């Protein structure tokens, strides 16, 4: 398993913190910050793991996840969903849409690292 | 329809003990019991219909005792509602005992004598009714709390403010723990993260203040939790904005009165009844002018172009809009509709995915709805997207029309209509960015802005 993570998130300071943590752990981190062309970013970067925020400008994270799962080349890529809402409904939606894991904001850095490592090992 | 109703009603009455015949006969009808059970279980009508494989409108007729039910459907409904079929089919005595059992099941530590429920119901029917009544009331209250919680979760103002706060908290938490946990952090990074925390804490402060201000200023805080408009819209939404009863050839003002009365019995407030009555009378008029079968056939032949439909039927665009919004989704696809009066106040909202409609305050002045209001007789078509998280591109068709008969002394009032449909794609032209309402709008350079946004920055 490679070590390339694509972080799709629109909050600049969250991007910076998460990129920092993952880079220190030896990951190659690419970032993308809007929903419109997120799928193109996935195709261009061909990541080993995607971290995807649910609330993105332009397109919802669930829709993007659906596009990832519909693309034969990326259907199997582990996707960690991030959201500010922890309601069961969102969790169910994420599971239905094919999320590999689900994490509620605010999260701890250790949790993010654990999740990414676990997904890479899976 | 009425005759049929009475027939079923009489049959049901005949099997009931004499003593229970008079008070609130509605309670003893199968449909009413199914509805009660469903509401108690907190299941939506559409959900239950789907579970048992019947259409929501058919279930609705059953629940209003307008369709006879028995056999397989009854068994399936009972199983989906997790009750004995006899609870639905038999009279109040069985319901009472099973109600007591249910209450006993939920009792914490009170240790009721479960094996003596029948005896209790028989010897103290009044007390038994009180117990089951309290238990049911409790269920209803829990349901109300859930509805209110759900409403809070879907309030666009609250959602936007909370998103701001949570985003800032997330960034601060991640950054702060990097500062604390990373050994030998380079000075440049340290400085950078300090600056980020400072930025985010300022943003958090603003977000928290906006939230407090919003909660303090929330209308109806101490009074009614729901406005009559909300109540009326809840009734329309529960029926999917479609009323089979009013599509009948024989439907008339009495049908409207009966529908309103049925909602009144279910607790619809007086002002909301007035609003509902007006909307349904309009519905009836539209259904008579453009009967469903013919209109749906034209729709299939001419496609979903309201102008072509108006041309072919001789109806006004506003009427065609209302009719399209009243058709079941299977016929017309997803259709949203917003209507405002001349003051710009939204008086009718049928939602569509990806387009938020404010409930509390004025909508975005950039909506094609308001453009139409300022240029009556000139319909317009736009591709719009709300600049917000979750906003999707939709097609908006808007037109303003005068309501009612003309009068030489004063003009008939104007209303504007905006029909919303899923994005037609690039063929529909360029996408215009619009908002929901200024307070939660990130559009920075907007000439139509009337108050600052509570969002810290644009997307």
Image: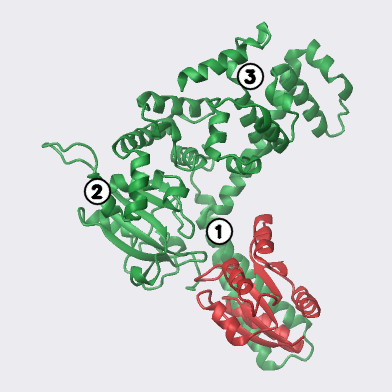
Chain B is which colour? green
Name the residue nearer the viewer: B27 or B217: B27
Q: In which image quadrant can residue B384 be found? A: bottom left
Q: On what subunit does the disc labeled 2 rest?
A: B
Tell me which residue sits at (49%, 57%) in the image. B353
Q: Which residue is mark 2?
A: B312
Task: Give the quarter of the image for residue A117.
Answer: bottom right
- Labels 1 and 3: the sequence-earlier one: 3
Whether discs 3 and 2 lie on one chain: the answer is yes
**Chain identifier of the residue bearing label 1 in the image:** B
Q: CA distance from mark 3 to mark 2?
A: 48 Å
In the rendering, at what x and y percent does residue B284 appear? 35, 34
Point out the frontmost of discs 1 and 3: 3
- Please check whether the numbered discs 1 and 2 fall on a single chain: yes
Which label is found at residue B159? 1
Which is nearer the eye, B340 or B160?
Answer: B340
The location of residue A74, given as percent across then percent down, is 65, 78
- The reply to the same-chain question for discs 1 and 3 is yes
Q: Residue at x 25, y 57 (%)?
A: B379
Tell me the red chain. A
**Image vertical order of residue A58 relative to residue B246, above or below:** below
- Residue B202 position, x and y percent, is 57, 72
Q: Earlier in the sequence, mark 1 or mark 2?
A: 1
- The residue tagged with tag 3: helix, strand or loop? helix
Left or right? Give the position of B284 relative to B22.
left
A24 in relation to A72, above or below: below
| Circle 1: element type | helix
Identify residue for label 3: B28
């Amino acid at each position: 398993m490679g070590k390339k993570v694509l972080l799709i998130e629109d909050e600049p300071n969250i991007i910076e913190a998460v990129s920092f943590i993952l880079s220190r752990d030896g990951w190659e981190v690419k970032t993308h910050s809007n929903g419109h062309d997120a799928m193109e970013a996935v195709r261009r970067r061909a990541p080993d793991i995607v971290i995807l925020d649910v609330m993105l400008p332009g397109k919802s994270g669930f829709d993007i996840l659906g596009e990832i799962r519909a693309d034969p080349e990326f259907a199997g890529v582990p996707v960690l969903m991030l959201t500010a809402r922890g309601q069961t409904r969102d969790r169910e939606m994420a599971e239905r849409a094919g999320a590999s894991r689900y994490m509620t904001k605010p999260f701890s850095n250790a949790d993010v690292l654990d999740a990414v490592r676990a997904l890479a090992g899976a | 329809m009425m005759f049929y109703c009475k027939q079923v009603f009489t049959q049901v009455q005949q099997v009931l003990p004499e003593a229970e015949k008079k008070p609130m006969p509605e309670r003893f009808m199968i449909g009413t019991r199914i509805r009660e059970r469903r509401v108690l279980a907190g299941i939506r009508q559409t959900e239950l219909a789907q579970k048992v494989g019947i259409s929501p409108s058919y279930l609705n007729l059953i629940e209003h005792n307008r369709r006879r039910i028995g056999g397989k459907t009854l068994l399936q409904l009972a199983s989906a509602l997790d009750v004995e079929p006899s609870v639905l089919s038999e009279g109040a005595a069985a319901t009472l005992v099973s109600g007591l059992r249910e209450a006993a099941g939920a009792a914490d530590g009170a240790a009721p004598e479960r094996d003596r429920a029948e005896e209790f119901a028989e010897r103290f029917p009044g007390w038994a009714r009180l117990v089951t009544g309290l238990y049911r009331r409790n269920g209803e209250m829990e349901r109300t709390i859930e509805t209110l919680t759900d409403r809070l979760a879907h309030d666009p103002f609250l959602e936007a403010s909370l998103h701001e706060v949570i985003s800032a908290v997330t960034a601060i938490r991640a950054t702060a723990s990097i500062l604390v946990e990373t050994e030998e952090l380079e000075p440049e990074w340290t400085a950078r993260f300090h600056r980020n925390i400072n930025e985010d804490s300022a943003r958090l402060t603003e977000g928290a203040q906006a939230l407090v201000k919003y909660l303090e200023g929330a209308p109806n805080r101490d009074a009614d939790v729901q406005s009559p408009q909300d109540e009326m819209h809840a009734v329309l939404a529960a029926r999917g904005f479609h009323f089979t009863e009013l599509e009948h050839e024989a439907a008339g003002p009495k049908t409207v009165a009966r529908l309103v009365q049925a909602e009144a019995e279910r607790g619809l407030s007086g002002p909301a009844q007035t609003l509902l009555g007006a909307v349904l009378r309009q519905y009836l008029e539209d259904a008579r002018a453009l009967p469903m079968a013919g209109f749906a056939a034209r729709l299939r032949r001419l496609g979903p172009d309201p102008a072509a439909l108006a041309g072919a039927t001789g109806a006004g665009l506003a009427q065609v809009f209302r009719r399209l919004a009243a058709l079941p989704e299977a016929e017309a696809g997803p259709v949203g509709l917003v209507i405002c009066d001349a003051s710009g106040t939204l008086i009718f909202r049928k939602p569509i995915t990806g387009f938020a409609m404010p409930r509390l305050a004025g909508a975005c002045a950039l909506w094609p709805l308001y453009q139409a209001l300022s240029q009556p007789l000139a319909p317009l078509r736009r591709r719009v997207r709300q600049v917000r998280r979750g906003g999707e591109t939709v097609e908006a068709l808007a037109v303003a029309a005068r309501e009612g008969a003309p009068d030489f002394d004063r003009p008939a009032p104007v209303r504007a209509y905006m029909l919303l449909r899923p994005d037609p794609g690039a063929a529909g032209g360029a996408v215009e960015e619009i908002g929901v309402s200024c307070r939660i709008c990130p559009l920075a350079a907007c000439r139509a802005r009337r108050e600052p946004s509570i969002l810290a920055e644009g997307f």
